[in-house]
Each structure stands twice: as structure tokens, then as C-alpha cells.
Amino acid sequence: MHYPVILKVLGLLLMVFSLTLLTPVLVASLYQENTHEAFFFSFAITFSIGMLMWLPYSREKGELRTRDGFFITVMFWVELGLVGAIPFVLTDAVHLSFTDAVFESISGLTTTGATVITGLDDLPKSLLYYRQQLQWLGGIGIVVIAVAIMPMLGVGGMQLYRAETPGPIKDNKLTPRITETAKALFFIYVALTAACMLAYWFAGMSAFDALAHSFSTVAIGGFSTHDSSMGFFYDNKAIISICTFFMVASGLNFGLHYYGWVRKSLSQYWRNPEARMYLLMLLAGCLVVSPYLFFTDTYQETDSFFHGIFQLVSIMTTTGFATTNFSSWPTFLPFLLLFLSFFGACAGSTGGGIKVGRMLILAKQGFREIHRLIHPSGVFHIKVRNRNVPERIADAIWAFFGAYLAVYYLMVLLLLASGLDYVTAWSATAAALNNLGPGLGDVALHYGDINNFSKWILCIGMLLGRLEIFTLLVLLNPMFWRR
């Protein structure tokens, strides 16, 4: 492990993050709020910590190895979750404990969207903006953005890119150079955010709400500036429709957005097996949920259509927005929605969950084993787009799936041991590990009423989900630390 270079990189990234704390200061000044001191003090603390880590090793140069990349990725998300909590602790408007502040910070950065805060409509605009900004930064992954500046430090960035990029095919690069890949991802992300913001604004949102909700929509985060989430805008069906569209778009692989932009063609989306399965699952889910709401007399026809489609898309893409309290729907539906969140969005998107691409390959493996039972001497390959999937990738996906289930049920048991009921423990674990946000039972509306031990377990779960489990678990292997 190259600890001097690691500390240098972590310190620099922390200083870069500290600059984002100045934006809420401007928002506070614009709305004449008294929170600017808390944010400026948070900036000073964060920048100073980063400077103390960076300065002693500022002249160190070296190439990061894969192990270094994993370590930097995990440590950066952990330290970011801790320093990101500082404004919540220092701001008098929310009075959060240290545990609640860290929970809110990690929930924002991992784009989970689970919150311990109530009374959002009455909070200062600067604090509301800061929550949304955390999700926007976490959506693209600050580490992925930062690899664009790594060559200037004499540090290679590919190891960070591999450790941070979600999905089963994380070695693929959109462009030959990693810096160009980071720029391409960042451009797509900003372009989607700008388009979403303008669409919200033209549809009738205020400029502040349009900016704030575009951040959490494209990041598939789910934080809102209102307690009723997108239900605050439910009477404006144009806003609900725009939100649904951008949740679907943000759940697609950003590489497809890149190729669609470069080649000026939408056919890339349908030809991609993962994207096709993702879109068909969304369609099938909508055809189940909306009619079920109508025929069970939960809502009238129009409300069944809009509530059903919106909540299905929001939960499956792991965004977590709400137009209504879906946990009060007929028992079958809330569990169906949470079940679909395990599939999540596509690999290479800002969404959570196991990822549709992994589920697709797992399904193909299942069919292959059935075919082998029928023809024991036959040779059957797993193919995606007429290309054989390497056995190494197939084995890695099974290992991920096994580790995911093991971590999931360990968390459920720990939450049950802390005193939560089964529905709350099961859904809270799903919401944390899938980076979803809303759950059932005691966490249907917010997480403020559960005990501190459960909150720390869920914080670990959110980080595991955002870093796709192995990135964090690999640090627990003794072999990782051997020379």
C-alpha cells in the first residue's frame, strides 16, 4: 500500500469536496438566512482536514495499484459521510444528533434518500439545497469525477474508476483515456440534470424546487424539499410525468446515453439486452400495479394510473420519490414494489439494487443448468448480444449474489436483535442495501424514530450498496493487507 500517495489523494479529494460547501453559503445569502456561518465553518473544518492530509505528501508521486484504488474509494466515502454531517450538526434549524447527522449525510451521498428529518417545508433553503447537492454529487460518484485530475498529480486513475463504477462490466471504458471517460460521464450527467431542471421549471415548479429536484431525480436519490415529496406537485400531472421520464432515463446505463448521443440514434437502447429487460420490466410492473389499484377501489382510474406508474418507476429504479404513502396500499403491492427494487436499475447508472444486467445473466445461467439436465453431454454458453459471457464474469456474479444475500440477512437479523419488527427490519435493510430510501412499517415515512444502533447498521448497509459490497468487503480479507 502506498500510504503517502493515498493520504495525498484523500486529502486533495477532501479539499475539493470542501469547496462544494460554499454553494449553500451563497444560497443562504440569497435568501437572507442565518445558516451561512454554519456552512462556512463546515467548509473551514473540511478544508483544514484535507490540507493536513495532503500537505506533508504533496510532492509524493506514484502509480496507484488496484488495492490502493479500493482502499481510497472506501475511505473516501467513509470520510465524506463523516464530514458531510458537519453542517447538519452545526445548523440550529434541525438539531440533529451526531448519529442522525451521519445517517442523513451518508443517505444523501449514497443516493439512498432515507431521511431522519421532518418538517422539510419549514427548513432554511440553504439546508434543503445542501441535502439535494449531496445526492447530486454522490450520484455521479465524486471519485469518478476526480479521476479526470489524477494525471496532474502523477497518479493513475483507472484503479479508482474500476473500484467506483457500478455494474458487472466495470472494466469497459467509453473512451480510450480514463480522463476522457470521466469527462464524458460528467457531461452526460450535467446535461441530463440541466434538461430535467428546465423541464420542471417550464412545467410550473419554482426555480429553487426545479434545481433541487433535478439534482435528486437524475441522481436517483429521492430527497425532496417537501415532506410530501413529489406528492406536493401531484396536481400538476406534467411535473409527475417529467419526473417519471427522467427517473427511467437515469436508470439506464450512462454508456448507452453516450453512444446514443455520439451516434444520434435511439436504437442503441432497445438493442442492449439489459436496457430492453429493464424497460420491459417497468412496463410489466405498470400493467400490474395500476389496474390492481383500480380494481381494488384504492383509487379512481386517473389516480390509479398516475400513482401506480410513478411509484412503480420510483421504487424499481431505487429513486424513492413518493406521490402517496404506498405502504398503505393493499398488502401485495408494497412488497411487490420492494421486491422489484432488488432488480434495481441498469449497470452503469446512478441507480442501486443488484442491477438488471446481473439478474439477466443469472437467469441465463439458470436456463443453462436446466438445459444441462436435459442434455448432460451438451455444451451451452451464456450469451449476451451473441457474445459468450466469460465464465469468470458469470462466477463473479454468482459470488456477488451470494454475498448480497448473506449481508442482507445478517443485517435483517441485527435489526431484529435491536428491537425492530420483521416488516420494518426487512424493508429497512432492502431500502438501505438497494439505496432505495422508503420502507415499510416504522420506516415508511422517515427513519427518525428507530434506535441509533439500527441507524449505524443501515449506514453500513447504504455504503455496502453504493460500493457494491465487494469493494468494501475486500478490505476485510487478510490477503488484501499482505505484501
Image: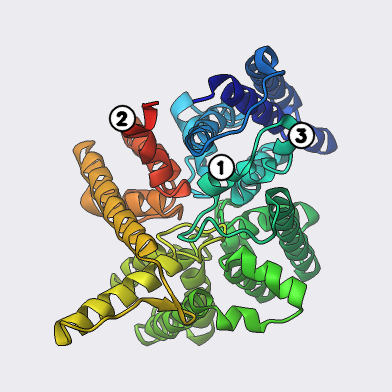
Q: Are marks 1 and 3 in contact (CB under 8 Å)?
A: no
Percent x, y of residue 313: 51, 71
The reply to whether residue 309 is visible in this rendering is yes
- Nearer the observer, 261 or 280: 261
Q: Which residue is mark 3?
A: 152
- Please name the amino acid that badge 3 sits on: Met
Residue appearing at x 77%, y 36% in the figure: 23
Crowdedness near tag 2: few (<14), some (14–19) or many (≥20) residues, C-alpha within 10 Å:
few
Between the residue at mark 1 and the residue at mark 2, the CA separation in whole angstroms equals 20 Å
Percent x, y of residue 58: 71, 18
Residue appearing at x 72%, y 43% in the figure: 148
Depicted 415 relative to depicted 375: above or below:
above
Crowdedness near tag 1: few (<14), some (14–19) or many (≥20) residues, C-alpha within 10 Å:
many
Q: Which type of secondary structure does the marked residue at label 2 adopt?
A: helix
Between the residue at mark 1 and the residue at mark 3, the CA separation in whole angstroms equals 16 Å
Q: Which type of secondary structure does the marked residue at label 1 adopt?
A: helix
Q: Which numbered disc flags the more N-terminal residue, 2 or 3?
A: 3
The reply to whether residue 449 is visible in this rendering is no
- Please name the amino acid that badge 2 sits on: Pro
Q: Which residue is mark 2?
A: 478
Which numbered disc covers residue 26? none
Percent x, y of residue 92: 61, 25
Q: Which numbered disc flags the more N-terminal residue, 1 or 2?
A: 1
Left or right: where 106 falls relative to 454: right
Q: Which residue is mark 1?
A: 159
Residue appearing at x 77%, y 57% in the figure: 206
- Please name the amino acid that badge 1 sits on: Gln
- Nearer the observer, 23 or 38: 23
Coloring basis for residues:
rainbow
Left or right: where 309 falls relative to 410: right
Depicted 36 relative to depicted 245: above or below:
above
